[in-house]
Amino acid sequence: MVKGISRRVVVVDSPDQRFFEQAIFILRSDAAGEGVSARQLVDEARQVARNYGGGGRGRFSRLWGDLNPAVYTLMGAGATGLLWMIAALG
């Protein structure tokens, strides 16, 4: 069913179009009259799209998840070496 109502939308293109081409945000009807610029709307839409898949993770969790796997490898190797050294001295 199609209604005769026009809506304002913000369309954000995906930086990596492997799975998704665009995200489409439908603006609330009262959002246009609040003195918000088009640039602010686009910036807010990009921020929401970027953070949407994070599941509400905290800052530390986001930083931990963004680490390069090489860092995990070095941390594990360092911890293993430290444990071996403690065992050898003890």
Image (cartoon, helix red, strand yellow):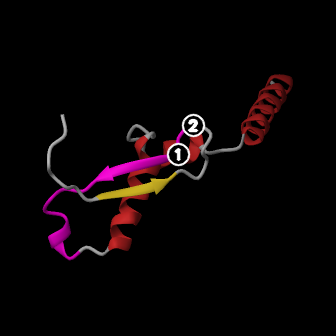
Front residue of 89/22: it is 22
Per the image, label 1 sits on a secondary structure element best described as loop
Residue indicated by mark 2: 19
**Neighbourhood count class around disc 2 (C-alpha, 10 Å): few under 14, some 14–19, many 20 upward:** few
Residue 72 x/y as whole percent: 72, 36
Q: Is residue 89 left or right of residue 35?
A: right
Q: Is residue 26 left or right of residue 17?
A: left
Which numbered dot is residue 64? none
What residue is drawn where x is 58% and y is 42%? 64
What residue is drawn where x is 43% and y is 57%? 46
What kind of residue is marked 2? Phe
Residue 80 x/y as whole percent: 79, 28
Residue 54 x/y as whole percent: 45, 40
What residue is drawn where x is 62% and y is 39%? 18
Per the image, label 2 sits on a secondary structure element best described as loop
Segment colored magenta: 19-35
Residue 8: which quarter of the image?
bottom left
Quadrant of the snapshot with the N terminus: top left
What residue is drawn where x is 19% and y is 68%? 32
Residue 79: which quarter of the image?
top right
Report how far apart the C-alphas of labels 1 and 2 lie in the structure: 7 Å
Residue indicated by mark 1: 21
Residue furthest out toward the right: 88
**Neighbourhood count class around disc 1 (C-alpha, 10 Å): few under 14, some 14–19, many 20 upward:** few
What kind of residue is marked 1? Glu
